[in-house]
Amino acid sequence: MITPKKTVNALKRVKAMADKHDAMIVMASEMSRQDRELLMKTGWLRDIVQGWYLLTRPDIHPGDSASWYANFWDFLRVYLQERFGTDYCLSAEASLELHIGNSVTPKQVVVIVKEGGTVQQLPFDTSLLIYPDLKNLPKQKEIIQGLQVMSLPLALCKVSPTYYRKLSDNIEIALRSIRDPADLTRIIVENEFQSAAERIIGSYLFFGLEKEAGNIKRQLDLVGMQIYPKNPFEKTSPNLIATRFRSPSPYAARIELLWNKFRNPIIKLFPKEIGLPKNPKEYLRQVGELYVYDAYNSLSIEGYQVSEELIMRVQKKSWNPSLHPEDAKERNALAARGYYEAFQAVKQTLKKILKGNSPGECVEDDLSAWYQNLFSPSVQAEIISRETLFGFRRDRVFIRNSRHSPPPFEAVLDSMETFFNCLRKEESAAVRAILGHYIFVFIHPYMDGNGRIARFILNTMLASGGYPWSIVQVKRRNEYINALEAVHTTSDIKPFVCFIIEEMQLSKKLLKSLL
Protein backbone atom coordinates (compact mmCIF):
# COMPACT_ATOMS: atom_id res chain seq x y z
CA MET A 1 0.00 0.00 0.00
CA ILE A 2 1.30 3.45 -0.97
CA THR A 3 1.40 5.85 1.97
CA PRO A 4 2.54 9.50 2.15
CA LYS A 5 5.41 8.47 4.43
CA LYS A 6 6.66 5.84 1.95
CA THR A 7 6.41 8.37 -0.89
CA VAL A 8 8.33 11.05 1.03
CA ASN A 9 11.11 8.63 2.00
CA ALA A 10 11.44 7.30 -1.55
CA LEU A 11 11.48 10.85 -2.91
CA LYS A 12 14.26 11.87 -0.52
CA ARG A 13 16.43 8.94 -1.58
CA VAL A 14 15.92 9.51 -5.31
CA LYS A 15 16.32 13.28 -5.02
CA ALA A 16 19.69 12.69 -3.32
CA MET A 17 20.81 10.76 -6.41
CA ALA A 18 19.59 13.50 -8.74
CA ASP A 19 21.43 16.11 -6.70
CA LYS A 20 24.71 14.31 -7.40
CA HIS A 21 24.20 15.23 -11.06
CA ASP A 22 23.06 18.77 -10.21
CA ALA A 23 19.97 17.96 -12.28
CA MET A 24 16.53 16.41 -12.06
CA ILE A 25 17.82 13.33 -13.86
CA VAL A 26 18.28 9.85 -12.36
CA MET A 27 19.31 6.47 -13.71
CA ALA A 28 17.50 3.23 -12.92
CA SER A 29 20.75 1.86 -11.49
CA GLU A 30 20.79 4.66 -8.89
CA MET A 31 17.53 3.68 -7.19
CA SER A 32 15.82 0.58 -5.95
CA ARG A 33 13.05 -1.06 -7.93
CA GLN A 34 10.60 -0.33 -5.12
CA ASP A 35 11.42 3.40 -5.08
CA ARG A 36 11.22 3.61 -8.86
CA GLU A 37 7.85 1.88 -9.11
CA LEU A 38 6.38 3.87 -6.23
CA LEU A 39 7.46 7.23 -7.67
CA MET A 40 6.30 6.27 -11.15
CA LYS A 41 2.85 5.40 -9.80
CA THR A 42 2.59 8.63 -7.80
CA GLY A 43 3.73 10.82 -10.72
CA TRP A 44 7.10 11.92 -9.34
CA LEU A 45 9.10 10.12 -12.05
CA ARG A 46 8.69 10.11 -15.85
CA ASP A 47 10.43 7.96 -18.46
CA ILE A 48 12.99 9.59 -20.74
CA VAL A 49 14.66 6.60 -22.41
CA GLN A 50 15.23 3.09 -21.11
CA GLY A 51 17.02 3.29 -17.78
CA TRP A 52 16.73 7.09 -17.48
CA TYR A 53 14.12 9.11 -15.64
CA LEU A 54 13.05 12.71 -15.08
CA LEU A 55 12.20 13.76 -11.54
CA THR A 56 9.11 15.95 -11.85
CA ARG A 57 5.86 16.78 -9.99
CA PRO A 58 2.54 14.93 -9.92
CA ASP A 59 0.59 18.11 -10.65
CA ILE A 60 2.32 18.53 -14.03
CA HIS A 61 0.16 16.97 -16.71
CA PRO A 62 1.92 14.20 -18.71
CA GLY A 63 1.25 16.19 -21.89
CA ASP A 64 2.94 19.33 -20.56
CA SER A 65 6.36 19.67 -22.20
CA ALA A 66 7.68 22.41 -19.90
CA SER A 67 9.47 20.07 -17.48
CA TRP A 68 11.16 18.22 -20.35
CA TYR A 69 12.31 21.35 -22.16
CA ALA A 70 13.49 22.77 -18.82
CA ASN A 71 15.71 19.73 -18.29
CA PHE A 72 16.63 18.89 -21.89
CA TRP A 73 20.23 20.10 -21.79
CA ASP A 74 20.76 18.73 -18.27
CA PHE A 75 19.71 15.30 -19.51
CA LEU A 76 22.15 15.46 -22.43
CA ARG A 77 24.95 16.52 -20.08
CA VAL A 78 24.39 13.68 -17.62
CA TYR A 79 23.63 11.05 -20.28
CA LEU A 80 26.65 11.84 -22.46
CA GLN A 81 28.97 12.10 -19.46
CA GLU A 82 27.82 8.70 -18.23
CA ARG A 83 28.26 7.03 -21.63
CA PHE A 84 31.33 8.76 -23.05
CA GLY A 85 33.01 10.77 -20.33
CA THR A 86 34.58 13.67 -22.23
CA ASP A 87 35.18 11.68 -25.43
CA TYR A 88 32.42 13.35 -27.41
CA CYS A 89 31.56 16.70 -28.94
CA LEU A 90 28.31 18.28 -30.04
CA SER A 91 28.03 18.94 -33.76
CA ALA A 92 29.01 22.30 -35.23
CA GLU A 93 25.35 23.37 -35.43
CA ALA A 94 24.53 22.42 -31.82
CA SER A 95 27.80 23.95 -30.58
CA LEU A 96 27.14 27.24 -32.36
CA GLU A 97 23.60 27.48 -31.00
CA LEU A 98 24.77 26.94 -27.42
CA HIS A 99 27.44 29.62 -27.88
CA ILE A 100 24.88 32.18 -29.03
CA GLY A 101 22.21 31.22 -26.49
CA ASN A 102 19.64 30.03 -29.02
CA SER A 103 16.35 30.00 -27.14
CA VAL A 104 14.53 27.19 -28.97
CA THR A 105 14.94 23.58 -27.84
CA PRO A 106 16.14 21.72 -30.97
CA LYS A 107 14.23 18.82 -32.42
CA GLN A 108 17.47 16.83 -32.73
CA VAL A 109 20.98 17.18 -31.32
CA VAL A 110 23.86 15.52 -33.18
CA VAL A 111 26.86 14.26 -31.19
CA ILE A 112 30.25 13.08 -32.52
CA VAL A 113 31.98 10.22 -30.65
CA LYS A 114 34.93 7.90 -31.19
CA GLU A 115 32.78 4.80 -31.56
CA GLY A 116 29.29 3.50 -30.83
CA GLY A 117 26.62 5.33 -32.83
CA THR A 118 22.91 5.26 -32.06
CA VAL A 119 19.69 7.24 -32.37
CA GLN A 120 17.74 7.89 -29.17
CA GLN A 121 14.13 9.00 -29.46
CA LEU A 122 13.39 11.44 -26.64
CA PRO A 123 10.15 12.91 -25.24
CA PHE A 124 8.05 15.43 -27.15
CA ASP A 125 9.40 14.63 -30.59
CA THR A 126 13.04 15.35 -29.77
CA SER A 127 15.93 13.02 -30.45
CA LEU A 128 19.66 12.45 -30.02
CA LEU A 129 21.77 11.26 -32.96
CA ILE A 130 25.17 9.88 -31.91
CA TYR A 131 27.58 8.90 -34.66
CA PRO A 132 31.24 7.79 -34.65
CA ASP A 133 33.70 10.02 -36.52
CA LEU A 134 37.11 9.89 -34.87
CA LYS A 135 38.68 12.01 -37.63
CA ASN A 136 36.32 14.95 -37.01
CA LEU A 137 36.22 14.72 -33.23
CA PRO A 138 37.97 17.96 -32.17
CA LYS A 139 41.06 17.61 -30.02
CA GLN A 140 40.39 20.93 -28.33
CA LYS A 141 36.89 21.58 -27.05
CA GLU A 142 35.11 24.02 -24.82
CA ILE A 143 32.49 23.43 -22.16
CA ILE A 144 29.07 25.13 -22.16
CA GLN A 145 26.42 24.08 -19.66
CA GLY A 146 28.63 21.11 -18.84
CA LEU A 147 28.58 19.88 -22.46
CA GLN A 148 31.61 19.29 -24.69
CA VAL A 149 31.33 21.68 -27.66
CA MET A 150 33.40 23.08 -30.49
CA SER A 151 34.81 26.57 -30.10
CA LEU A 152 32.70 29.23 -31.77
CA PRO A 153 35.31 29.92 -34.53
CA LEU A 154 35.51 26.20 -35.36
CA ALA A 155 31.74 25.83 -35.34
CA LEU A 156 31.38 28.79 -37.73
CA CYS A 157 33.83 27.15 -40.09
CA LYS A 158 32.19 23.73 -39.94
CA VAL A 159 28.48 24.47 -40.17
CA SER A 160 27.11 23.72 -43.62
CA PRO A 161 26.35 26.21 -46.42
CA THR A 162 22.69 25.25 -45.94
CA TYR A 163 22.85 26.41 -42.32
CA TYR A 164 24.18 29.78 -43.49
CA ARG A 165 21.30 30.10 -45.94
CA LYS A 166 18.47 28.88 -43.70
CA LEU A 167 19.60 30.22 -40.32
CA SER A 168 21.35 33.42 -41.27
CA ASP A 169 20.20 35.17 -38.07
CA ASN A 170 22.25 32.72 -36.01
CA ILE A 171 25.30 33.30 -38.21
CA GLU A 172 24.91 37.06 -37.84
CA ILE A 173 24.79 36.81 -34.04
CA ALA A 174 27.67 34.30 -33.95
CA LEU A 175 30.00 36.43 -36.07
CA ARG A 176 29.23 39.47 -33.92
CA SER A 177 30.06 37.38 -30.83
CA ILE A 178 33.62 36.66 -32.00
CA ARG A 179 36.00 38.72 -29.84
CA ASP A 180 38.88 38.68 -32.31
CA PRO A 181 38.45 37.69 -35.99
CA ALA A 182 42.05 36.45 -35.90
CA ASP A 183 40.68 33.43 -34.01
CA LEU A 184 38.80 32.55 -37.19
CA THR A 185 41.94 33.01 -39.28
CA ARG A 186 43.88 30.53 -37.13
CA ILE A 187 41.18 27.89 -37.48
CA ILE A 188 40.94 28.44 -41.25
CA VAL A 189 44.70 28.16 -41.77
CA GLU A 190 45.15 25.19 -39.45
CA ASN A 191 42.43 23.19 -41.22
CA GLU A 192 42.71 24.69 -44.73
CA PHE A 193 39.04 25.67 -44.69
CA GLN A 194 39.01 27.39 -48.09
CA SER A 195 35.24 27.33 -48.67
CA ALA A 196 34.49 28.29 -45.07
CA ALA A 197 36.84 31.27 -45.38
CA GLU A 198 34.97 32.49 -48.45
CA ARG A 199 31.63 32.19 -46.64
CA ILE A 200 32.89 33.93 -43.50
CA ILE A 201 34.56 36.84 -45.28
CA GLY A 202 31.51 37.16 -47.53
CA SER A 203 29.34 37.25 -44.41
CA TYR A 204 31.38 40.04 -42.81
CA LEU A 205 31.12 42.06 -46.02
CA PHE A 206 27.36 41.48 -46.16
CA PHE A 207 27.01 42.81 -42.61
CA GLY A 208 28.94 45.93 -43.54
CA LEU A 209 31.98 44.95 -41.46
CA GLU A 210 34.62 45.65 -44.11
CA LYS A 211 37.42 46.08 -41.56
CA GLU A 212 37.00 42.58 -40.12
CA ALA A 213 36.58 41.05 -43.59
CA GLY A 214 39.67 42.85 -44.88
CA ASN A 215 41.81 41.80 -41.91
CA ILE A 216 40.99 38.11 -42.36
CA LYS A 217 41.56 38.24 -46.13
CA ARG A 218 44.96 39.99 -45.73
CA GLN A 219 46.03 37.43 -43.13
CA LEU A 220 45.05 34.57 -45.44
CA ASP A 221 46.85 36.23 -48.36
CA LEU A 222 50.02 36.20 -46.25
CA VAL A 223 49.94 32.40 -46.05
CA GLY A 224 49.13 31.97 -49.73
CA MET A 225 45.41 31.19 -49.54
CA GLN A 226 43.55 32.62 -52.52
CA ILE A 227 40.12 33.66 -51.25
CA TYR A 228 37.14 34.73 -53.33
CA PRO A 229 34.48 35.95 -50.86
CA LYS A 230 30.93 34.77 -51.47
CA ASN A 231 27.67 36.01 -50.01
CA PRO A 232 26.24 32.81 -48.45
CA PHE A 233 22.81 34.24 -47.59
CA GLU A 234 19.43 34.29 -49.26
CA LYS A 235 18.33 37.53 -47.58
CA THR A 236 19.18 40.89 -49.12
CA SER A 237 20.09 42.93 -46.03
CA PRO A 238 21.35 42.35 -42.48
CA ASN A 239 19.10 42.81 -39.45
CA LEU A 240 21.62 44.31 -37.03
CA ILE A 241 23.33 47.71 -37.04
CA ALA A 242 26.26 47.38 -39.38
CA THR A 243 28.39 50.05 -37.72
CA ARG A 244 28.80 48.08 -34.49
CA PHE A 245 30.91 44.92 -34.54
CA ARG A 246 30.17 43.33 -31.15
CA SER A 247 26.94 43.34 -29.15
CA PRO A 248 26.87 43.37 -25.31
CA SER A 249 25.75 39.71 -25.35
CA PRO A 250 24.30 37.25 -27.87
CA TYR A 251 20.93 37.66 -26.16
CA ALA A 252 21.01 41.43 -26.60
CA ALA A 253 22.09 40.94 -30.21
CA ARG A 254 19.16 38.60 -30.88
CA ILE A 255 16.65 41.08 -29.43
CA GLU A 256 17.97 43.89 -31.63
CA LEU A 257 18.00 41.55 -34.61
CA LEU A 258 14.40 40.42 -34.05
CA TRP A 259 13.25 44.00 -33.65
CA ASN A 260 14.85 45.12 -36.91
CA LYS A 261 13.74 41.97 -38.72
CA PHE A 262 10.06 42.22 -37.80
CA ARG A 263 9.36 45.96 -37.88
CA ASN A 264 8.72 46.33 -41.63
CA PRO A 265 6.35 43.33 -41.87
CA ILE A 266 4.39 44.75 -38.90
CA ILE A 267 4.10 48.18 -40.49
CA LYS A 268 2.85 46.65 -43.75
CA LEU A 269 0.17 44.58 -41.98
CA PHE A 270 -1.09 47.02 -39.36
CA PRO A 271 -3.81 49.66 -39.93
CA LYS A 272 -2.53 53.17 -40.45
CA GLU A 273 -1.65 55.06 -37.30
CA ILE A 274 -3.94 58.02 -36.49
CA GLY A 275 -1.84 59.68 -33.80
CA LEU A 276 -2.51 60.50 -30.18
CA PRO A 277 -6.20 60.72 -29.19
CA LYS A 278 -7.49 64.30 -29.43
CA ASN A 279 -9.48 63.85 -26.23
CA PRO A 280 -7.23 62.09 -23.66
CA LYS A 281 -9.86 62.25 -20.91
CA GLU A 282 -12.42 60.47 -23.07
CA TYR A 283 -9.85 57.84 -24.07
CA LEU A 284 -9.05 57.17 -20.39
CA ARG A 285 -12.75 56.98 -19.59
CA GLN A 286 -13.21 54.37 -22.32
CA VAL A 287 -10.28 52.37 -20.92
CA GLY A 288 -12.02 52.43 -17.55
CA GLU A 289 -15.23 51.12 -19.14
CA LEU A 290 -13.31 48.10 -20.46
CA TYR A 291 -11.59 47.32 -17.13
CA VAL A 292 -13.82 44.46 -15.95
CA TYR A 293 -13.60 42.71 -19.32
CA ASP A 294 -9.87 43.34 -19.53
CA ALA A 295 -9.20 41.98 -16.05
CA TYR A 296 -11.44 38.94 -16.48
CA ASN A 297 -9.80 37.89 -19.75
CA SER A 298 -6.19 38.70 -18.81
CA LEU A 299 -6.40 36.87 -15.49
CA SER A 300 -8.29 33.93 -17.00
CA ILE A 301 -5.63 33.52 -19.71
CA GLU A 302 -3.09 32.99 -16.91
CA GLY A 303 -5.25 30.29 -15.30
CA TYR A 304 -6.90 32.29 -12.52
CA GLN A 305 -10.50 31.42 -11.67
CA VAL A 306 -12.15 34.82 -11.52
CA SER A 307 -15.65 36.17 -11.99
CA GLU A 308 -16.97 39.64 -12.79
CA GLU A 309 -18.33 39.81 -9.23
CA LEU A 310 -14.90 39.12 -7.74
CA ILE A 311 -13.20 41.65 -10.06
CA MET A 312 -15.73 44.33 -9.13
CA ARG A 313 -15.51 43.56 -5.42
CA VAL A 314 -11.71 43.81 -5.11
CA GLN A 315 -11.52 47.14 -7.00
CA LYS A 316 -13.58 48.99 -4.39
CA LYS A 317 -11.70 51.44 -2.17
CA SER A 318 -13.40 49.81 0.80
CA TRP A 319 -12.00 46.37 -0.10
CA ASN A 320 -10.71 44.78 3.05
CA PRO A 321 -9.65 41.14 3.21
CA SER A 322 -10.72 41.04 6.85
CA LEU A 323 -14.34 41.50 5.72
CA HIS A 324 -13.90 38.59 3.33
CA PRO A 325 -11.54 36.19 5.17
CA GLU A 326 -11.48 33.90 2.17
CA ASP A 327 -9.83 36.72 0.14
CA ALA A 328 -6.86 37.09 2.50
CA LYS A 329 -5.23 33.82 1.41
CA GLU A 330 -7.21 33.15 -1.76
CA ARG A 331 -4.94 33.12 -4.80
CA ASN A 332 -7.61 34.31 -7.25
CA ALA A 333 -8.77 37.22 -5.10
CA LEU A 334 -5.21 38.40 -4.46
CA ALA A 335 -4.42 38.18 -8.18
CA ALA A 336 -7.57 40.15 -9.00
CA ARG A 337 -6.74 42.86 -6.45
CA GLY A 338 -3.16 43.01 -7.75
CA TYR A 339 -4.43 43.39 -11.29
CA TYR A 340 -6.65 46.26 -10.21
CA GLU A 341 -3.79 48.08 -8.48
CA ALA A 342 -1.48 47.48 -11.45
CA PHE A 343 -4.18 48.74 -13.81
CA GLN A 344 -4.34 52.01 -11.89
CA ALA A 345 -0.55 52.38 -12.22
CA VAL A 346 -0.80 51.64 -15.95
CA LYS A 347 -3.43 54.36 -16.33
CA GLN A 348 -1.02 56.84 -14.74
CA THR A 349 1.57 55.86 -17.35
CA LEU A 350 -1.08 56.17 -20.03
CA LYS A 351 -1.87 59.74 -18.90
CA LYS A 352 1.77 60.71 -19.46
CA ILE A 353 1.83 59.08 -22.89
CA LEU A 354 -1.39 60.82 -23.94
CA LYS A 355 0.20 64.16 -22.98
CA GLY A 356 2.87 63.53 -25.62
CA ASN A 357 5.69 62.07 -23.52
CA SER A 358 7.92 59.40 -25.04
CA PRO A 359 5.95 56.10 -24.82
CA GLY A 360 9.11 54.02 -24.51
CA GLU A 361 10.55 56.18 -21.75
CA CYS A 362 7.24 56.18 -19.87
CA VAL A 363 7.08 52.39 -19.85
CA GLU A 364 10.74 52.09 -18.89
CA ASP A 365 10.23 54.50 -15.98
CA ASP A 366 7.04 52.86 -14.70
CA LEU A 367 7.47 49.16 -15.43
CA SER A 368 8.73 48.29 -11.95
CA ALA A 369 5.72 50.07 -10.40
CA TRP A 370 3.35 48.00 -12.55
CA TYR A 371 5.02 44.80 -11.38
CA GLN A 372 5.10 45.84 -7.73
CA ASN A 373 1.41 46.74 -7.76
CA LEU A 374 0.56 43.46 -9.47
CA PHE A 375 2.01 41.42 -6.61
CA SER A 376 1.74 43.78 -3.65
CA PRO A 377 -1.45 42.11 -2.29
CA SER A 378 0.29 38.71 -2.34
CA VAL A 379 3.24 40.19 -0.42
CA GLN A 380 0.90 41.73 2.14
CA ALA A 381 -0.79 38.36 2.55
CA GLU A 382 2.69 36.79 2.97
CA ILE A 383 2.11 34.50 0.00
CA ILE A 384 5.35 35.70 -1.60
CA SER A 385 8.36 37.35 -0.01
CA ARG A 386 8.88 41.12 -0.09
CA GLU A 387 12.22 41.02 -1.89
CA THR A 388 10.56 39.48 -4.97
CA LEU A 389 9.01 42.88 -5.71
CA PHE A 390 12.37 44.41 -6.59
CA GLY A 391 14.47 43.89 -9.68
CA PHE A 392 14.24 41.22 -12.32
CA ARG A 393 14.24 37.48 -11.80
CA ARG A 394 17.23 35.74 -10.30
CA ASP A 395 16.49 32.20 -11.47
CA ARG A 396 15.59 30.25 -14.58
CA VAL A 397 12.04 30.46 -15.88
CA PHE A 398 10.24 28.32 -18.44
CA ILE A 399 7.08 28.76 -20.50
CA ARG A 400 4.56 25.94 -20.36
CA ASN A 401 4.33 23.88 -23.57
CA SER A 402 6.76 26.12 -25.43
CA ARG A 403 10.03 25.16 -27.10
CA HIS A 404 11.26 28.68 -26.33
CA SER A 405 13.46 29.01 -23.25
CA PRO A 406 13.86 32.61 -22.05
CA PRO A 407 17.40 33.92 -21.54
CA PRO A 408 19.22 32.86 -18.35
CA PHE A 409 18.81 35.28 -15.48
CA GLU A 410 22.40 36.49 -15.92
CA ALA A 411 21.41 37.85 -19.35
CA VAL A 412 18.15 39.53 -18.33
CA LEU A 413 19.63 42.95 -17.55
CA ASP A 414 21.46 43.25 -20.91
CA SER A 415 18.34 42.00 -22.65
CA MET A 416 16.05 44.50 -20.95
CA GLU A 417 18.44 47.39 -21.66
CA THR A 418 18.36 46.49 -25.35
CA PHE A 419 14.56 46.10 -25.22
CA PHE A 420 14.07 49.56 -23.71
CA ASN A 421 16.51 51.07 -26.19
CA CYS A 422 14.52 49.61 -29.09
CA LEU A 423 11.22 50.73 -27.54
CA ARG A 424 12.49 54.30 -27.01
CA LYS A 425 13.87 54.69 -30.53
CA GLU A 426 10.95 53.12 -32.38
CA GLU A 427 8.80 55.62 -34.30
CA SER A 428 5.92 53.29 -35.17
CA ALA A 429 3.26 52.77 -32.49
CA ALA A 430 2.25 49.49 -34.14
CA VAL A 431 5.80 48.16 -33.90
CA ARG A 432 6.11 49.36 -30.30
CA ALA A 433 2.87 47.54 -29.46
CA ILE A 434 3.53 44.21 -31.21
CA LEU A 435 7.23 43.92 -30.41
CA GLY A 436 6.80 45.52 -27.00
CA HIS A 437 4.55 42.59 -26.15
CA TYR A 438 6.52 39.90 -27.99
CA ILE A 439 10.04 40.82 -26.89
CA PHE A 440 8.93 41.24 -23.28
CA VAL A 441 7.52 37.69 -23.35
CA PHE A 442 10.68 36.51 -25.14
CA ILE A 443 12.82 37.82 -22.26
CA HIS A 444 10.37 36.86 -19.46
CA PRO A 445 12.17 39.19 -17.02
CA TYR A 446 10.04 38.21 -14.01
CA MET A 447 9.26 34.88 -12.41
CA ASP A 448 5.54 35.61 -12.76
CA GLY A 449 3.24 38.20 -14.29
CA ASN A 450 5.00 38.43 -17.66
CA GLY A 451 1.89 37.81 -19.76
CA ARG A 452 -0.23 40.37 -17.92
CA ILE A 453 2.50 43.01 -18.12
CA ALA A 454 3.13 42.25 -21.81
CA ARG A 455 -0.54 42.98 -22.51
CA PHE A 456 -0.25 46.26 -20.56
CA ILE A 457 2.72 47.19 -22.78
CA LEU A 458 0.73 46.22 -25.87
CA ASN A 459 -2.12 48.52 -24.90
CA THR A 460 -0.13 51.54 -23.76
CA MET A 461 1.78 51.41 -27.03
CA LEU A 462 -1.45 51.01 -29.04
CA ALA A 463 -2.80 54.09 -27.26
CA SER A 464 0.32 56.05 -28.28
CA GLY A 465 -0.79 55.64 -31.89
CA GLY A 466 -4.47 56.34 -31.31
CA TYR A 467 -5.47 52.68 -31.57
CA PRO A 468 -8.15 51.37 -29.18
CA TRP A 469 -7.40 49.55 -25.94
CA SER A 470 -7.55 45.90 -26.97
CA ILE A 471 -8.55 42.84 -24.95
CA VAL A 472 -7.08 39.43 -25.70
CA GLN A 473 -10.03 37.11 -25.08
CA VAL A 474 -9.59 33.98 -23.00
CA LYS A 475 -11.79 32.03 -25.43
CA ARG A 476 -9.06 32.61 -28.03
CA ARG A 477 -6.24 31.69 -25.69
CA ASN A 478 -4.98 28.80 -27.84
CA GLU A 479 -4.81 31.00 -30.95
CA TYR A 480 -2.94 33.62 -28.94
CA ILE A 481 -0.40 31.14 -27.54
CA ASN A 482 0.07 29.43 -30.92
CA ALA A 483 0.69 32.77 -32.62
CA LEU A 484 3.41 33.63 -30.08
CA GLU A 485 4.93 30.15 -30.46
CA ALA A 486 5.09 30.63 -34.24
CA VAL A 487 7.27 33.70 -33.70
CA HIS A 488 9.50 31.80 -31.24
CA THR A 489 10.03 28.72 -33.39
CA THR A 490 9.58 29.77 -37.04
CA SER A 491 10.25 33.54 -36.92
CA ASP A 492 6.83 34.13 -38.47
CA ILE A 493 5.38 37.32 -36.98
CA LYS A 494 2.34 37.50 -39.28
CA PRO A 495 -0.06 35.24 -37.28
CA PHE A 496 0.55 37.25 -34.11
CA VAL A 497 0.09 40.60 -35.86
CA CYS A 498 -3.13 39.45 -37.53
CA PHE A 499 -4.42 38.07 -34.22
CA ILE A 500 -3.86 41.39 -32.44
CA ILE A 501 -5.53 43.31 -35.28
CA GLU A 502 -8.59 41.05 -35.00
CA GLU A 503 -8.76 41.48 -31.22
CA MET A 504 -8.35 45.24 -31.62
CA GLN A 505 -11.34 45.36 -33.98
CA LEU A 506 -13.47 43.20 -31.67
CA SER A 507 -12.56 45.38 -28.68
CA LYS A 508 -13.62 48.46 -30.63
CA LYS A 509 -17.03 46.87 -31.19
CA LEU A 510 -17.27 45.89 -27.51
CA LEU A 511 -16.55 49.45 -26.44
CA LYS A 512 -19.30 50.81 -28.71
CA SER A 513 -21.78 48.41 -27.11
CA LEU A 514 -20.83 49.63 -23.63
CA LEU A 515 -21.06 53.36 -24.32
Image (cartoon, helix red, strand yellow):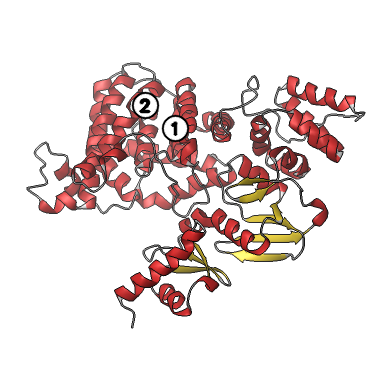
Looking at the picture, which amino acid does disc 1 mark?
Answer: Gly
Label 1 secondary element? helix
Q: Label for residue 363? A: 2
Looking at the picture, which amino acid does disc 2 mark?
Answer: Val
Q: Are marks 1 and 2 in contact (CB under 8 Å)?
A: yes
Q: Quadrant of residue 132?
A: bottom right
Q: Label for residue 191? A: none
Q: Is residue 215 above or below residue 168?
A: above
For this view, does 341 lie left or right of residue 45?
A: left
For the N terminus, which image quadrant?
Answer: bottom left
Q: Position of residue 299 (x, y in %)?
A: 30, 47
Q: Label for residue 436? A: 1
For this view, does 476 lie left or right of residue 222?
A: left
Q: Residue at x 46, y 75 (%)?
A: 36
Along the line of sight, the residue nearer the viewer: 380 or 30: 30
Label 2 secondary element? helix
For this view, does 472 lie left or right of residue 281?
A: right
